[in-house]
């Protein structure tokens, strides 16, 4: 009974941590962009990109200092496949959805209190007209995210502070190359969808079906494909990512 109780306690901590991390990331993500677009604030795009990378790292690190936070659902899919535990998806992705919505709602409330008229969608200066183009670029971002995540594990032999730091740099680099292109949502997919729902601005979406296919289903299938491709290329089919056996608290067994 005690062991079962401990198991549920750990599960609850992971879910709460994912919720907190996702809330923080969406809140800071949109807040930094809004401040960059606001003429009253002056900081360079380089600083904005740095803030976005830092927002991811801080959101992963803050909740429980154990690096078990994913925030990006496609990373949760990779981890579920690695550990052969689909409950990771069932536990973490709902927390990511609720957390992203909460963070975006807090951002909207803050902007209302500040009487700010900044429109986050104004950052999209280059508009993709064809759904196929939107799909291609979202899949390209997801490919880089998942491939980089997996390769960083291979390079560092464990999931720790250093690999998480370098993955935050990958997030930062992808933001630099994609932030002005419309509908590239892979870095904060639930945050963007929450923002669209809260603002009621559905103009750039084709329809509900294609929105789900482009921004959720296709990237998820790509993440699954990347996992099996890298596993079969770099590892024996029954081997997992090599891990340190030091048992340090900095081990990031879920990210």
Image: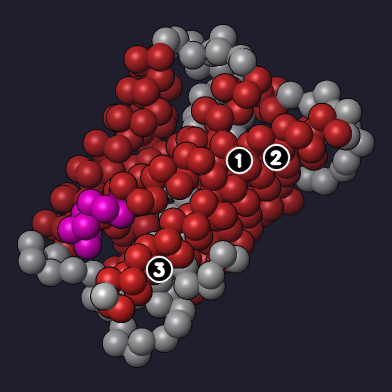
Q: Is residue 147 visible?
A: no
Nearer the camera: disc 1 or disc 3: 3
The quadrant the N terminus occupies is bottom left
Percent x, y of residue 115: 88, 28
Instruction: Quote the CA–CA distance across marks 2 and 1.
Output: 6 Å
Relative to 244, 206 lies left or right = right
**Residue at x-position 24% and y-position 36%:** 221
Which residue matches tag 1? 102
* Label 3 environment density (alpha carbons within 10 Å; few <14, some 14–19, many ≥20): few
Relative to 57, 51 lies left or right = right
SS at badge 3 = helix
**Residue at x-position 37% and y-position 23%:** 212
Instruction: Quote the CA–CA distance across marks 2 and 3.
Output: 28 Å
Q: Tell me where the magenta segment starts and ends, as one range.
A: 81-89
Q: Which mark is residue 106?
A: 2
Quarter of the view holding residue 11: bottom left
Q: Give the mark nearest the N terminus, 1 or 3.
A: 3
């Amino acid at each position: 009974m005690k062991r079962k109780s401990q198991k549920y306690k750990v599960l609850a901590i992971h879910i709460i941590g994912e919720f907190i991390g996702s809330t923080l990331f969406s809140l800071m993500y949109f807040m930094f962009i809004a401040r960059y677009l606001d003429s009253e604030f002056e900081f360079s795009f380089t600083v904005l990109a740095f803030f976005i990378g830092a927002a991811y790292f801080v959101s992963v690190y803050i909740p429980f200092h154990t690096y078990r936070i994913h925030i990006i659902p496609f990373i949760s899919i990779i981890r579920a496949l690695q550990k052969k535990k689909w409950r990771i998806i069932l536990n973490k992705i709902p927390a990511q959805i609720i957390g992203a919505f909460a963070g975006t709602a807090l951002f909207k409330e803050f902007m209302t209190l500040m009487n700010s008229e900044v429109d986050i969608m104004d950052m999209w200066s280059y508009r993709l007209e064809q759904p196929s183009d939107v799909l291609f670029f979202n899949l390209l971002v997801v490919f880089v995210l998942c491939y980089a995540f997996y390769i960083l594990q291979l390079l560092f032999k464990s999931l720790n502070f250093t690999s998480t730091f370098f993955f935050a740099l990958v997030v930062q680099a992808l933001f630099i190359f994609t932030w002005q292109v419309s509908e590239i949502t892979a870095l904060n997919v639930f945050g963007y969808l929450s923002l669209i729902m809260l603002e009621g601005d559905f103009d750039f979406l084709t329809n509900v079906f294609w929105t789900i296919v482009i921004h959720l289903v296709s990237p998820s299938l790509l993440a699954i494909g990347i996992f099996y491709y890298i596993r079969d290329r770099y590892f024996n089919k029954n081997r997992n990512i090599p891990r340190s056996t030091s048992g340090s608290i900095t081990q990031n067994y879920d990210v």
